[in-house]
Image: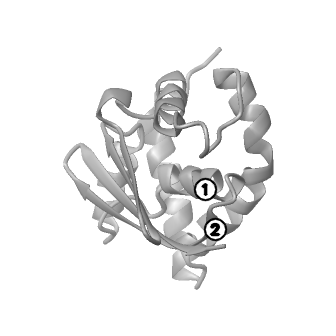
Amino acid sequence: MVKFNPVYNAIILGILLSAAEKIGINPVLIGRQTSRLLAPLLDSLFKRFIGKTLSLNNGNLLEDIKKIVKTGEISDPEKLELTFSGNCVTLKLADCMYLDMANYGKTLGHDCCPMCIAGVFMTGVLSSLDTGEVLNFKVENKENNCIVKFAILEK
């Protein structure tokens, strides 16, 4: 099977998101809608990739997400951090698979990726865990590290 070059993936996805933004479609809104479509699919995906569904109650949420990150080769699972504080959730990633898109996004005037794929995925996770609605998320990128902050409207 042919493997897709991640740089090409970054350019294609980045330019599509930037084009959507140029015609007035905010990438964050695309991400929010994408996460709503993703959330109902996550239980079956988690069962497939880590053998169980995620839960806030079992105390292993971070370890389960690290397994997903490792299986999907999304970022370095050992450097992954997830913190909950009031109505804010913070996800810290190192060596994200989309760093090429972050760097390309910077050439288009963005601070990082035009739309953070890890942010969209985590928005879906938070929705599927029924923690509340993600109102927005912001991403900071510094070299190989990304910090994604989610503003949550708690239920």
- Name the element at disc 1: helix
For the residues labelled 1 and 2, say whether their Cβ atoms are less than 8 Å apart: yes
Q: Where is residue 120 in the image (x, y as percent from the top left)?
A: 56, 56
Q: Name the residue under label 2.
A: 132
**Label 1 to label 2: alpha-carbon separation:** 7 Å
The amino acid sitting under disc 1 is Leu
Identify the residue at horizontal 59%, vertical 73% (top origin).
Answer: 154
- Name the element at disc 2: strand
Residue 153, relative to residue 73: is it above or below? below
- Label 1, residues with CA under 10 Å away: few <14, some 14-19, many ≥20: many
Quadrant of the rendered image containing residue 148: bottom left
Quadrant of the rendered image containing residue 26: bottom right
Identify the residue at horizontal 39%, vertical 50% (top origin).
Answer: 101
Identify the residue at horizontal 76%, vertical 38% (top origin).
Answer: 43
Q: In the orientation shown, which residue stands out farthest toward the bottom?
A: 24
Q: Nearer the viewer, residue 142 or 59?
A: 59
**As drawn, is 43 to the left or to the right of 110?**
right
Residue 73, relative to residue 19: is it above or below? above
Q: Earlier in the sequence, mark 1 or mark 2?
A: 1
Q: Position of residue 29 (x, y in %)?
A: 61, 74
- Label 2, residues with CA under 10 Å away: few <14, some 14-19, many ≥20: some
The amino acid sitting under disc 2 is Gly
Q: In the orientation shown, which residue stands out farthest toward the left?
A: 143
Residue 5, disc: none
Residue 100, relative to residue 128: is it above or below? above
Q: Position of residue 22 (x, y in %)?
A: 52, 80
Quadrant of the rendered image containing residue 114: bottom left
Q: Which of 139 and 154 is in front in this view?
A: 154
Residue 126, disc: 1
